[in-house]
């Protein structure tokens, strides 16, 4: 199952709002606010790579108050 970690920068002070919205997006399995260069880290899974790209491009990146994202697609998952 294709998986990606999406690092998200939000507008200042809007981390909580973006987290709430992220948790309603299909495919977002986890999301956490973090300190550092990025504000939020989300783990996203989908049935296909095309669906994964669609979730990141059309749902996450277009959320209100999201300024930028960096997507890291998982190459190998260790169980």
Image (cartoon, helix red, strand yellow):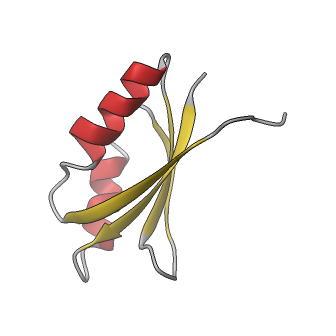
Q: Residue at x 22, y 37 (%)?
A: 58
Left or right placement of residue 50 versus residue 30 in this view: left
Q: Residue furthest right?
A: 79
Q: Residue at x 37, y 32 (%)?
A: 53
Is residue 48 visible to the viewer in this orientation of the structure? yes
Question: Compared with residue 27, is residue 62 higher up or lower down, i.e. above or below?
Answer: below
Residue 20 in the image: state x and y as whole percent: 31, 56
Left or right placement of residue 40 versus residue 67 in this view: right
Q: Residue at x 39, y 21 (%)?
A: 50
Left or right placement of residue 58 versus residue 36 in this view: left
The quadrant where residue 11 appears: bottom left
Left or right placement of residue 72 versus residue 70 in this view: right
Tell me the quarter of the image containing the C terminus. Answer: top right
Q: Residue at x 32, y 71 (%)?
A: 15
Viewer-proximal residue among 74 and 55:
74
Viewer-proximal residue among 69 and 14:
69
The quadrant where residue 7 appears: bottom left
Residue 34 in the image: state x and y as whole percent: 51, 74
Residue 1 in the image: state x and y as whole percent: 61, 21
Q: Residue furthest top?
A: 47
The quadrant where residue 68 appears: bottom left
Residue 55 in the image: state x and y as whole percent: 33, 33
Is residue 25 visible to the viewer in this orientation of the structure? no
Question: Compared with residue 63, is residue 55 higher up or lower down, i.e. above or below?
Answer: above
Viewer-proximal residue among 70 and 8:
70
Question: Compared with residue 74, is residue 16 higher up or lower down, i.e. above or below?
Answer: below
């Amino acid at each position: 199952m294709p998986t990606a970690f999406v690092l998200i920068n939000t507008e200042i002070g809007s981390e909580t709002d973006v987290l709430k919205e992220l948790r309603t997006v299909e495919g977002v399995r986890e999301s956490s606010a973090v300190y550092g260069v990025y504000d939020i880290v989300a783990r996203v899974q989908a049935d296909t790579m095309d669906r994964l790209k669609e979730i990141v491009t059309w749902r996450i990146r277009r959320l209100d108050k999201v300024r930028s994202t960096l997507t890291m697609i998982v190459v190998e998952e260790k169980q």
